[in-house]
Protein backbone atom coordinates (compact mmCIF):
# COMPACT_ATOMS: atom_id res chain seq x y z
CA UNK A 1 0.00 0.00 0.00
CA UNK A 2 2.02 3.00 -1.23
CA UNK A 3 -0.72 5.54 -0.60
CA UNK A 4 -0.70 4.90 3.13
CA UNK A 5 0.15 8.04 5.10
CA UNK A 6 1.51 8.16 8.65
CA UNK A 7 -0.90 8.76 11.53
CA UNK A 8 -1.18 12.54 11.91
CA UNK A 9 0.11 13.90 15.21
CA UNK A 10 -2.62 14.07 17.87
CA UNK A 11 -5.17 12.32 15.65
CA UNK A 12 -6.93 10.68 18.57
CA UNK A 13 -6.30 13.17 21.32
CA UNK A 14 -5.97 16.72 20.06
CA UNK A 15 -9.29 18.43 20.72
CA UNK A 16 -8.23 21.40 18.63
CA UNK A 17 -11.74 22.09 17.30
CA UNK A 18 -13.20 22.65 20.79
CA UNK A 19 -13.83 20.58 23.89
CA UNK A 20 -16.94 18.89 22.48
CA UNK A 21 -15.80 18.35 18.90
CA UNK A 22 -13.76 15.56 17.33
CA UNK A 23 -10.06 16.26 16.73
CA UNK A 24 -9.93 18.06 13.36
CA UNK A 25 -7.69 15.27 12.01
CA UNK A 26 -10.52 12.78 12.56
CA UNK A 27 -13.01 15.02 10.78
CA UNK A 28 -10.61 15.41 7.85
CA UNK A 29 -10.15 11.67 7.67
CA UNK A 30 -13.91 11.12 7.51
CA UNK A 31 -14.20 13.71 4.75
CA UNK A 32 -11.38 12.29 2.66
CA UNK A 33 -11.34 8.55 3.36
CA UNK A 34 -13.87 7.26 5.92
CA UNK A 35 -12.18 3.85 5.92
CA UNK A 36 -8.46 4.69 6.03
CA UNK A 37 -5.29 2.67 6.25
CA UNK A 38 -2.71 4.55 8.31
CA UNK A 39 0.92 3.91 9.02
CA UNK A 40 1.50 3.78 12.77
CA UNK A 41 4.77 5.00 14.29
CA UNK A 42 5.92 1.45 14.98
CA UNK A 43 5.74 0.70 11.25
CA UNK A 44 2.58 -1.34 11.04
CA UNK A 45 -0.52 -0.45 9.01
CA UNK A 46 -3.75 -0.17 10.97
CA UNK A 47 -7.19 1.02 9.85
CA UNK A 48 -9.28 3.89 11.13
CA UNK A 49 -13.02 3.95 10.42
CA UNK A 50 -14.80 7.29 10.83
CA UNK A 51 -17.86 7.33 8.49
CA UNK A 52 -21.25 6.60 10.06
CA UNK A 53 -22.30 4.03 7.51
CA UNK A 54 -19.00 2.13 7.61
CA UNK A 55 -18.90 2.20 11.43
CA UNK A 56 -22.37 0.68 11.68
CA UNK A 57 -21.62 -1.99 9.12
CA UNK A 58 -18.37 -2.88 10.82
CA UNK A 59 -19.94 -3.17 14.28
CA UNK A 60 -22.61 -5.50 12.93
CA UNK A 61 -20.12 -7.69 11.06
CA UNK A 62 -18.99 -10.87 12.80
CA UNK A 63 -15.80 -10.94 10.73
CA UNK A 64 -14.49 -8.19 12.99
CA UNK A 65 -13.45 -9.73 16.27
CA UNK A 66 -13.75 -7.93 19.62
CA UNK A 67 -10.81 -9.87 20.99
CA UNK A 68 -8.70 -6.77 20.68
CA UNK A 69 -9.47 -4.90 23.83
CA UNK A 70 -6.42 -2.69 23.85
CA UNK A 71 -8.24 0.37 25.08
CA UNK A 72 -9.58 -1.01 28.29
CA UNK A 73 -7.35 -3.87 29.28
CA UNK A 74 -3.71 -4.60 28.92
CA UNK A 75 -3.08 -5.63 25.35
CA UNK A 76 0.09 -4.37 23.69
CA UNK A 77 0.56 -0.65 23.53
CA UNK A 78 3.94 -0.46 21.87
CA UNK A 79 3.24 3.08 20.90
CA UNK A 80 0.95 4.69 23.46
CA UNK A 81 -2.61 4.79 22.25
CA UNK A 82 -1.89 2.83 19.08
CA UNK A 83 -2.62 -0.82 18.54
CA UNK A 84 -0.17 -3.23 16.97
CA UNK A 85 -1.42 -6.14 14.91
CA UNK A 86 -1.67 -9.25 17.01
CA UNK A 87 -3.46 -12.50 16.94
CA UNK A 88 -6.83 -12.18 18.62
CA UNK A 89 -6.00 -11.51 22.24
CA UNK A 90 -6.36 -14.21 24.87
CA UNK A 91 -9.70 -13.97 26.61
CA UNK A 92 -9.95 -12.77 30.16
CA UNK A 93 -12.56 -14.91 31.93
CA UNK A 94 -15.90 -13.11 32.27
CA UNK A 95 -14.88 -9.95 30.38
CA UNK A 96 -17.34 -10.57 27.57
CA UNK A 97 -16.98 -7.12 25.95
CA UNK A 98 -13.71 -8.56 24.57
CA UNK A 99 -15.11 -11.91 23.42
CA UNK A 100 -16.78 -13.14 20.27
CA UNK A 101 -19.76 -15.47 19.95
CA UNK A 102 -20.36 -18.11 21.20
CA UNK A 103 -18.34 -17.25 24.37
CA UNK A 104 -19.77 -13.75 24.35
CA UNK A 105 -23.32 -15.02 23.85
CA UNK A 106 -23.12 -17.49 26.72
CA UNK A 107 -22.14 -14.80 29.25
CA UNK A 108 -24.19 -11.88 27.97
CA UNK A 109 -27.31 -14.05 28.03
CA UNK A 110 -26.92 -14.51 31.76
CA UNK A 111 -27.32 -10.77 32.26
CA UNK A 112 -29.88 -9.57 29.75
CA UNK A 113 -32.78 -10.25 32.18
CA UNK A 114 -31.23 -7.99 34.81
CA UNK A 115 -30.99 -4.98 32.47
CA UNK A 116 -34.24 -5.01 30.47
CA UNK A 117 -36.19 -1.82 29.73
CA UNK A 118 -38.90 -3.08 32.13
CA UNK A 119 -36.47 -3.71 34.99
CA UNK A 120 -34.90 -0.32 34.47
CA UNK A 121 -38.29 1.46 34.43
CA UNK A 122 -39.04 -0.19 37.77
CA UNK A 123 -35.79 1.21 39.06
CA UNK A 124 -36.54 4.73 37.85
CA UNK A 125 -38.19 5.95 41.05
CA UNK A 126 -35.25 4.78 43.08
CA UNK A 127 -32.76 6.48 40.75
CA UNK A 128 -34.76 9.72 41.07
CA UNK A 129 -34.44 9.38 44.89
CA UNK A 130 -30.68 8.89 44.64
CA UNK A 131 -30.43 11.98 42.40
CA UNK A 132 -32.57 14.12 44.69
CA UNK A 133 -30.62 13.12 47.80
CA UNK A 134 -27.37 13.97 46.09
CA UNK A 135 -28.76 17.32 44.97
CA UNK A 136 -30.00 18.03 48.53
CA UNK A 137 -26.47 17.46 49.76
CA UNK A 138 -25.01 19.66 47.02
CA UNK A 139 -27.50 22.46 47.75
CA UNK A 140 -26.27 22.57 51.35
CA UNK A 141 -22.73 23.37 50.19
CA UNK A 142 -21.38 26.84 49.60
CA UNK A 143 -20.48 27.25 45.93
CA UNK A 144 -18.27 26.94 44.00
CA UNK A 145 -18.24 23.14 44.09
CA UNK A 146 -16.92 20.45 41.78
CA UNK A 147 -19.93 18.92 40.05
CA UNK A 148 -18.00 15.74 39.27
CA UNK A 149 -17.27 15.04 42.91
CA UNK A 150 -20.59 16.19 44.34
CA UNK A 151 -22.97 14.85 41.74
CA UNK A 152 -21.82 13.26 38.48
CA UNK A 153 -19.65 10.52 40.02
CA UNK A 154 -21.70 9.67 43.16
CA UNK A 155 -25.03 9.14 41.35
CA UNK A 156 -24.02 6.31 38.97
CA UNK A 157 -21.61 4.87 41.57
CA UNK A 158 -24.39 4.62 44.18
CA UNK A 159 -26.78 3.07 41.66
CA UNK A 160 -24.39 0.46 40.24
CA UNK A 161 -23.11 -0.47 43.72
CA UNK A 162 -26.61 -1.12 44.90
CA UNK A 163 -27.60 -3.08 41.80
CA UNK A 164 -24.49 -5.25 41.90
CA UNK A 165 -24.30 -5.55 45.69
CA UNK A 166 -20.91 -3.82 45.99
CA UNK A 167 -20.58 -1.85 49.28
CA UNK A 168 -20.56 1.88 48.40
CA UNK A 169 -18.21 2.44 51.34
CA UNK A 170 -15.53 0.66 49.28
CA UNK A 171 -15.77 3.19 46.44
CA UNK A 172 -12.46 4.91 47.27
CA UNK A 173 -10.57 1.86 46.05
CA UNK A 174 -12.54 0.98 42.97
CA UNK A 175 -13.00 4.54 41.71
CA UNK A 176 -9.26 5.17 41.94
CA UNK A 177 -8.37 1.86 40.28
CA UNK A 178 -10.93 2.38 37.50
CA UNK A 179 -9.60 5.86 36.81
CA UNK A 180 -5.98 4.62 36.64
CA UNK A 181 -7.07 1.97 34.34
CA UNK A 182 -8.57 4.37 31.85
CA UNK A 183 -5.51 6.61 31.47
CA UNK A 184 -4.37 6.18 27.87
CA UNK A 185 -0.62 6.32 28.26
CA UNK A 186 -0.42 4.52 31.59
CA UNK A 187 2.62 2.25 31.76
CA UNK A 188 1.58 -1.37 31.52
CA UNK A 189 2.78 -2.16 35.06
CA UNK A 190 0.56 0.52 36.56
CA UNK A 191 -2.41 -0.55 34.52
CA UNK A 192 -1.85 -4.11 35.65
CA UNK A 193 -1.50 -3.02 39.28
CA UNK A 194 -4.87 -1.24 39.12
CA UNK A 195 -6.38 -4.27 37.39
CA UNK A 196 -4.99 -6.69 39.96
CA UNK A 197 -6.16 -4.47 42.82
CA UNK A 198 -9.68 -4.22 41.50
CA UNK A 199 -10.07 -7.86 40.49
CA UNK A 200 -8.57 -9.05 43.82
CA UNK A 201 -11.20 -7.06 45.67
CA UNK A 202 -13.99 -8.35 43.42
CA UNK A 203 -12.83 -11.99 43.61
CA UNK A 204 -13.24 -11.82 47.42
CA UNK A 205 -16.63 -10.22 47.06
CA UNK A 206 -18.06 -12.78 44.60
CA UNK A 207 -16.62 -15.64 46.67
CA UNK A 208 -18.51 -14.33 49.70
CA UNK A 209 -21.67 -13.95 47.63
CA UNK A 210 -21.35 -17.52 46.40
CA UNK A 211 -21.21 -18.69 50.02
CA UNK A 212 -24.02 -16.40 51.21
CA UNK A 213 -26.02 -14.91 48.32
CA UNK A 214 -28.00 -11.73 48.87
CA UNK A 215 -30.56 -9.86 46.79
CA UNK A 216 -28.44 -8.31 44.03
CA UNK A 217 -27.13 -9.02 40.52
CA UNK A 218 -23.76 -10.46 41.58
CA UNK A 219 -25.51 -12.80 44.04
CA UNK A 220 -27.89 -13.97 41.31
CA UNK A 221 -24.88 -14.71 39.10
CA UNK A 222 -23.02 -16.39 41.98
CA UNK A 223 -25.95 -18.81 42.39
CA UNK A 224 -25.29 -20.03 38.83
CA UNK A 225 -22.95 -23.02 39.15
CA UNK A 226 -22.14 -22.76 35.45
CA UNK A 227 -20.00 -19.68 36.20
CA UNK A 228 -16.54 -20.00 37.75
CA UNK A 229 -15.25 -17.53 40.35
CA UNK A 230 -12.86 -16.16 37.69
CA UNK A 231 -15.78 -15.54 35.37
CA UNK A 232 -17.86 -13.96 38.13
CA UNK A 233 -14.92 -11.67 38.91
CA UNK A 234 -14.50 -10.67 35.26
CA UNK A 235 -18.21 -9.92 34.90
CA UNK A 236 -18.22 -7.91 38.13
CA UNK A 237 -15.17 -5.96 36.92
CA UNK A 238 -16.78 -5.16 33.58
CA UNK A 239 -20.12 -4.10 35.08
CA UNK A 240 -18.58 -2.00 37.82
CA UNK A 241 -16.20 -0.20 35.48
CA UNK A 242 -18.70 0.30 32.65
CA UNK A 243 -21.46 1.10 35.11
CA UNK A 244 -20.05 4.16 36.81
CA UNK A 245 -17.30 5.79 34.72
CA UNK A 246 -19.33 6.20 31.55
CA UNK A 247 -22.50 7.69 33.01
CA UNK A 248 -20.49 9.90 35.37
CA UNK A 249 -18.66 11.40 32.40
CA UNK A 250 -21.90 11.91 30.50
CA UNK A 251 -23.49 13.77 33.43
CA UNK A 252 -20.49 16.04 33.90
CA UNK A 253 -19.61 16.69 30.25
CA UNK A 254 -23.32 16.95 29.40
CA UNK A 255 -23.75 19.65 32.04
CA UNK A 256 -20.70 21.49 30.67
CA UNK A 257 -22.19 21.32 27.15
CA UNK A 258 -25.56 22.62 28.38
CA UNK A 259 -23.91 25.49 30.26
CA UNK A 260 -22.05 26.41 27.08
CA UNK A 261 -25.32 26.27 25.13
CA UNK A 262 -27.64 28.27 27.43
CA UNK A 263 -30.52 28.43 24.94
CA UNK A 264 -30.61 24.62 24.88
CA UNK A 265 -30.57 24.45 28.68
CA UNK A 266 -33.36 27.05 28.87
CA UNK A 267 -35.43 25.01 26.40
CA UNK A 268 -35.04 21.93 28.60
CA UNK A 269 -35.92 23.81 31.78
CA UNK A 270 -39.06 25.18 30.11
CA UNK A 271 -40.14 21.83 28.68
CA UNK A 272 -38.91 18.75 30.55
CA UNK A 273 -40.75 16.56 28.01
CA UNK A 274 -37.77 17.27 25.77
CA UNK A 275 -35.50 15.34 28.15
CA UNK A 276 -35.58 11.84 26.64
CA UNK A 277 -34.70 13.28 23.22
CA UNK A 278 -32.13 15.63 24.77
CA UNK A 279 -30.37 12.68 26.41
CA UNK A 280 -30.05 10.96 23.02
CA UNK A 281 -28.75 14.18 21.49
CA UNK A 282 -26.21 14.69 24.27
CA UNK A 283 -25.10 11.07 23.79
CA UNK A 284 -24.67 11.67 20.06
CA UNK A 285 -23.02 15.06 20.37
CA UNK A 286 -20.55 14.05 23.09
CA UNK A 287 -19.91 10.35 22.30
CA UNK A 288 -17.81 10.00 25.45
CA UNK A 289 -16.92 6.37 24.69
CA UNK A 290 -15.35 7.19 21.34
CA UNK A 291 -12.58 4.79 20.35
CA UNK A 292 -13.07 1.01 20.07
CA UNK A 293 -10.87 -1.65 18.54
CA UNK A 294 -11.65 -4.61 16.35
CA UNK A 295 -9.53 -7.23 14.60
CA UNK A 296 -10.32 -8.45 11.06
CA UNK A 297 -10.40 -12.24 11.03
CA UNK A 298 -10.93 -12.32 7.24
CA UNK A 299 -10.39 -9.90 4.35
CA UNK A 300 -13.39 -7.58 4.48
CA UNK A 301 -14.69 -5.07 1.92
CA UNK A 302 -15.82 -1.94 3.70
CA UNK A 303 -16.61 1.46 2.23
CA UNK A 304 -14.85 0.58 -1.03
CA UNK A 305 -11.66 -0.57 0.71
CA UNK A 306 -10.35 -4.02 1.48
CA UNK A 307 -9.29 -4.48 5.07
CA UNK A 308 -6.93 -7.47 5.05
CA UNK A 309 -7.30 -10.31 7.53
CA UNK A 310 -5.14 -9.70 10.60
CA UNK A 311 -5.58 -5.92 10.63
CA UNK A 312 -6.29 -3.96 13.76
CA UNK A 313 -9.16 -1.56 13.18
CA UNK A 314 -9.87 1.57 15.19
CA UNK A 315 -13.47 2.74 15.20
CA UNK A 316 -14.43 6.31 16.11
CA UNK A 317 -18.01 6.54 17.34
CA UNK A 318 -17.64 10.31 17.77
CA UNK A 319 -16.61 10.82 14.15
CA UNK A 320 -19.51 8.60 13.02
CA UNK A 321 -22.01 10.53 15.13
CA UNK A 322 -20.82 13.79 13.56
CA UNK A 323 -21.14 12.53 9.99
CA UNK A 324 -23.11 15.09 7.94
CA UNK A 325 -24.23 12.27 5.64
CA UNK A 326 -26.30 10.94 8.57
CA UNK A 327 -27.11 13.97 10.78
CA UNK A 328 -27.88 17.47 9.49
CA UNK A 329 -25.68 20.18 10.96
CA UNK A 330 -23.94 17.51 13.06
CA UNK A 331 -21.64 19.78 15.05
CA UNK A 332 -24.56 21.67 16.57
CA UNK A 333 -26.13 20.55 19.84
CA UNK A 334 -29.88 20.62 19.25
CA UNK A 335 -31.98 19.00 21.96
CA UNK A 336 -35.03 19.09 19.69
CA UNK A 337 -33.53 16.97 16.92
CA UNK A 338 -34.14 13.25 16.48
CA UNK A 339 -30.76 11.80 17.36
CA UNK A 340 -32.04 8.23 17.21
CA UNK A 341 -29.69 6.00 15.31
CA UNK A 342 -26.59 7.43 16.99
CA UNK A 343 -23.93 4.82 17.72
CA UNK A 344 -22.86 6.07 21.16
CA UNK A 345 -23.96 2.82 22.76
CA UNK A 346 -22.32 0.85 19.98
CA UNK A 347 -24.18 -1.41 17.57
CA UNK A 348 -24.44 -5.13 16.90
CA UNK A 349 -23.97 -7.93 19.44
CA UNK A 350 -21.88 -5.82 21.83
CA UNK A 351 -24.33 -2.94 21.95
CA UNK A 352 -24.27 -1.52 25.47
CA UNK A 353 -25.93 -3.82 27.98
CA UNK A 354 -26.44 -0.96 30.44
CA UNK A 355 -27.97 1.53 28.03
CA UNK A 356 -31.42 1.58 29.62
CA UNK A 357 -29.88 2.09 33.03
CA UNK A 358 -27.69 4.89 31.67
CA UNK A 359 -30.76 6.55 30.09
CA UNK A 360 -32.71 6.39 33.35
CA UNK A 361 -29.77 7.92 35.23
CA UNK A 362 -29.20 10.67 32.68
CA UNK A 363 -32.87 11.65 32.46
CA UNK A 364 -33.20 11.82 36.23
CA UNK A 365 -29.81 13.51 36.61
CA UNK A 366 -30.22 16.31 34.05
CA UNK A 367 -33.85 16.86 35.03
CA UNK A 368 -33.06 17.17 38.74
CA UNK A 369 -30.00 19.34 38.23
CA UNK A 370 -31.68 21.83 35.87
CA UNK A 371 -34.79 22.10 38.08
CA UNK A 372 -33.04 22.43 41.43
CA UNK A 373 -30.29 24.79 40.27
CA UNK A 374 -31.96 27.33 37.96
CA UNK A 375 -28.94 29.64 38.06
CA UNK A 376 -26.25 26.96 37.67
CA UNK A 377 -23.16 28.41 35.96
CA UNK A 378 -19.50 27.62 35.43
CA UNK A 379 -17.35 28.99 38.23
CA UNK A 380 -14.30 29.34 35.94
CA UNK A 381 -13.87 30.41 32.29
CA UNK A 382 -14.76 27.51 29.97
CA UNK A 383 -11.16 27.34 28.69
CA UNK A 384 -10.00 26.45 32.20
CA UNK A 385 -12.17 23.34 32.46
CA UNK A 386 -9.78 20.42 32.19
CA UNK A 387 -11.03 17.86 29.69
CA UNK A 388 -10.10 14.18 29.72
CA UNK A 389 -8.16 14.07 26.46
CA UNK A 390 -5.80 11.73 28.32
CA UNK A 391 -8.46 9.14 29.16
CA UNK A 392 -10.11 6.33 27.25
CA UNK A 393 -13.51 7.63 28.27
CA UNK A 394 -13.87 11.34 27.54
CA UNK A 395 -15.24 13.86 30.00
CA UNK A 396 -13.98 16.49 32.41
CA UNK A 397 -11.64 15.92 35.33
CA UNK A 398 -13.55 18.47 37.37
CA UNK A 399 -16.40 20.93 36.68
CA UNK A 400 -16.33 23.91 39.03
CA UNK A 401 -19.89 25.29 39.21
CA UNK A 402 -21.67 28.00 41.14
CA UNK A 403 -25.27 29.22 41.67
CA UNK A 404 -27.13 31.98 43.42
CA UNK A 405 -30.18 30.15 44.70
CA UNK A 406 -31.81 26.72 44.57
CA UNK A 407 -35.37 25.52 43.97
CA UNK A 408 -37.19 22.81 45.95
C1 LIG B 1 -20.86 -1.97 25.97
C2 LIG B 1 -21.12 2.87 25.88
C3 LIG B 1 -23.24 2.85 30.26
C4 LIG B 1 -22.34 -1.88 30.63
C5 LIG B 1 -20.82 -0.66 25.55
C6 LIG B 1 -20.42 -0.25 24.22
C7 LIG B 1 -20.48 1.11 24.22
C8 LIG B 1 -20.94 1.56 25.51
C9 LIG B 1 -20.12 2.03 23.06
C10 LIG B 1 -20.03 -1.16 23.07
C11 LIG B 1 -18.61 -1.62 23.14
C12 LIG B 1 -18.15 -2.42 21.93
O1 LIG B 1 -18.84 -2.54 20.92
O2 LIG B 1 -17.02 -2.92 21.97
C13 LIG B 1 -21.71 3.27 27.08
C14 LIG B 1 -22.01 4.65 27.41
C15 LIG B 1 -22.62 4.64 28.64
C16 LIG B 1 -22.69 3.25 29.08
C17 LIG B 1 -21.69 5.85 26.54
C18 LIG B 1 -23.15 5.77 29.49
C19 LIG B 1 -23.62 6.87 29.05
C20 LIG B 1 -23.20 1.57 30.74
C21 LIG B 1 -23.72 1.16 32.03
C22 LIG B 1 -23.46 -0.16 32.15
C23 LIG B 1 -22.78 -0.60 30.92
C24 LIG B 1 -24.43 2.06 33.05
C25 LIG B 1 -23.84 -0.96 33.36
C26 LIG B 1 -23.96 -2.12 33.53
C27 LIG B 1 -21.84 -2.29 29.41
C28 LIG B 1 -21.44 -3.67 29.12
C29 LIG B 1 -21.01 -3.69 27.79
C30 LIG B 1 -21.16 -2.33 27.28
C31 LIG B 1 -21.49 -4.83 30.10
C32 LIG B 1 -20.51 -4.90 27.00
C33 LIG B 1 -21.63 -5.50 26.21
C34 LIG B 1 -21.21 -6.67 25.35
O3 LIG B 1 -20.03 -6.85 25.06
O4 LIG B 1 -22.10 -7.44 24.99
N1 LIG B 1 -21.16 0.45 26.31
N2 LIG B 1 -22.11 2.47 28.10
N3 LIG B 1 -22.64 0.48 30.10
N4 LIG B 1 -21.66 -1.52 28.28
FE1 LIG B 1 -22.00 0.45 28.17
Image (cartoon, grey):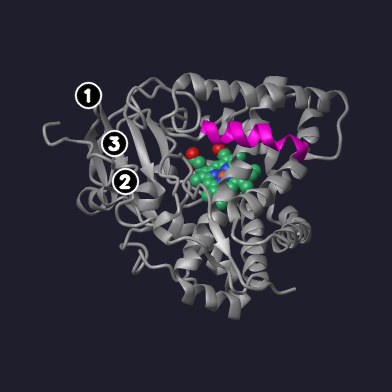
Label 1 or label 2, whichever comes before in sequence order: 2
Regarding mark 3 in the picture, which secondary structure is present there? strand
Q: Name the residue beneath numbered marker 1.
A: 43
Q: Residues within 10 Å of mark 2 (few under 14, many from 20)?
A: some
- Please tell me whether residue 398 is drawn above or below residue 67 in the rendered image: below
Q: Name the residue beneath numbered marker 2.
A: 14
Q: Is residue 177 magenta?
A: yes
Looking at the rendered structure, which numbered label has been put on residue 192?
A: none
Regarding mark 1 in the picture, which secondary structure is present there? loop
**Viewer-nearest of discs 1 and 2:** 2
Q: Residue 193 at x, y = what percent?
A: 56, 21
User: Is 403 situated left or right of 260 in this image?
Assistant: right
- Ligand number 1: quarter of image: top right
Provide the residue span drawn in magenta: 166-181
Looking at the image, the residue that sits furthest to the left is 2
Looking at the rendered structure, which numbered label has been put on residue 47?
A: 3
Q: Residue 5 at x, y = what percent?
A: 16, 36
User: Is 64 situated left or right of 202 in this image?
Assistant: left
- Mark-to-mark CA distance, 1 and 3: 13 Å
- Mark-to-mark CA distance, 1 and 2: 22 Å
Label 2 or label 3, whichever comes before in sequence order: 2
Q: Quadrant of the C terminus?
A: bottom right
Q: Quadrant of the N terminus?
A: top left
**Viewer-nearest of discs 2 and 3:** 2
Regarding mark 2 in the picture, which secondary structure is present there? loop
Amino acid sequence: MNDVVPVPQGLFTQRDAGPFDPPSGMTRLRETRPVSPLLFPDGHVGWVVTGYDAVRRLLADGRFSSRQDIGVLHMPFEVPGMPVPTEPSPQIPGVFIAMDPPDHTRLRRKLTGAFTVKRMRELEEHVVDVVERQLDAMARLTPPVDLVEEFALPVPSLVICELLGVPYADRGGFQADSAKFLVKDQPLEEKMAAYTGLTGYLADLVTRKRAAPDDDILSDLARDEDLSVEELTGIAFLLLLAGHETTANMLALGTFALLENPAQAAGLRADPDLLPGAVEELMRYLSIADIFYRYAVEDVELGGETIPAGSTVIVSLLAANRDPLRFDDPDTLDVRRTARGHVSFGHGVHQCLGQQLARVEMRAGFHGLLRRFPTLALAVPAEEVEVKADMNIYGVHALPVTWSGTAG
